[in-house]
Amino acid sequence: MGETISGWQLQGWMEQADAECTALGISSSEVHWFLQELGGLDRLALRLQTFKQQPAIPLLVPWSELTQLWQRRLTERIPLQYLAGRTYWRHFTLKVSPQVLIPRPETELIIDLAVSAIENIDNNGIWVDLGTGSGAIALGLADSFPTAEIHGVDTSLEALAIAESNAETTGLSSRIQFHHGSWWEPLQFLKGQLTGMVSNPPYIPSDIIPTLQPEVAQHEPTLALDGGDDGFDCIRYLVETAPHYLRPGGVWIVEMMAGQGEGVARLLEAQGSYSGIKIIPDLAGFDRFVIAYKKNRSLHYDSNLWFKSLLML
């Protein structure tokens, strides 16, 4: 039988951990998440505090190891998702490591936007996720478009290994082709064929990165964060190059940092190959995505369908 801890011991530790979180500006909700994910404790028991009267609560790992991991969370500011080796995104449980960006909840909406963008098209077509990282967006596309051909690209072999592992564990490996390379480099054979391009590219200005939370600045891959001097380096490249790969009416969807929407829209307009350009907020009301369509489209779409999808969430 594994190691146990008494309810009163656990309560005392949780009170101390809550105080530590407050002192460091860390959400106290992380204490419950930590105990659930790494200790194997029951979520409802923690929430209702029914564990207090239990004389022996079983643990998945030794208590000494758990407390050491928690201290690493506090002193090194390592994200809990990296300590646990996993995170949750849409309905997926995804493997993560410091080689990939931790998928954010706000990014989940990008899949709904993709679905609404071609809602009235029977053929799901061909989609690419550029800068796939953990594979989250590619997985979301494959899950939402059952007849689509999905491609994921990343310049990091370590990230691709994680993406492929996630595709295996979610049962979607047969639906996604992963490619190693920079942006479009391995996708020359798809020129003019894409129904959609989706990307969460690096978009944070270089000089802002050191000022971010330590969890981000010190532990998440800079390659996935750094968008150059103005944050637009990668977005600018995708604006210029995507028309060579999109079919007429193909959709361009990119996540961005709040405050970049007007700048991205101007880039798309100046490029001249796009129409139906819209800046789309996330559920918190911050401008988060830009969607556009390649001109001379033969696909029929309703440019307001993205808004309908928001209302249905």
Image: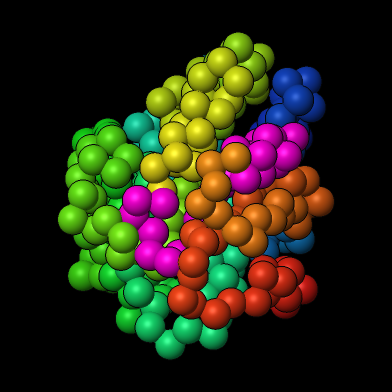
Q: Is residue 170 above or below residue 298?
A: above
Q: Is residue 299 above or below residue 96?
A: below
| Residue 177 screen position, x and y as percent | 22, 59
| Residue 131 screen position, x and y as percent | 38, 42
User: Which quarter of the image is occupied by the N terminus?
Assistant: bottom left
Asked whether 244 falls inside the magenta stretch, the response is: yes
Q: Is residue 70 above or below residue 255?
A: above
Q: In front here: 57 or 308?
A: 308
Q: In front here: 281 or 60?
A: 281
Identified at 46% across, 76% down, the residue is: 298
Q: In front here: 169 or 204?
A: 204
State left or right for residue 287 relative to residue 64. right
State left or right for residue 95 relative to residue 18. left
User: Which quarter of the image is occupied by the C terminus?
Assistant: bottom right
In the image, the segment drawn in magenta is: 243-269
Q: Quadrant of the rendered structure where residue 212 is? A: top right
Identified at 46% across, 54% down, the residue is: 198
Identified at 35% across, 74% down, the residue is: 125
Question: Visible in this render: residue 201?
Answer: no
Asked whether 193 falls inside the magenta stretch, the response is: no
| Residue 116 screen position, x and y as percent | 59, 74
Q: In front here: 45 or 262?
A: 262
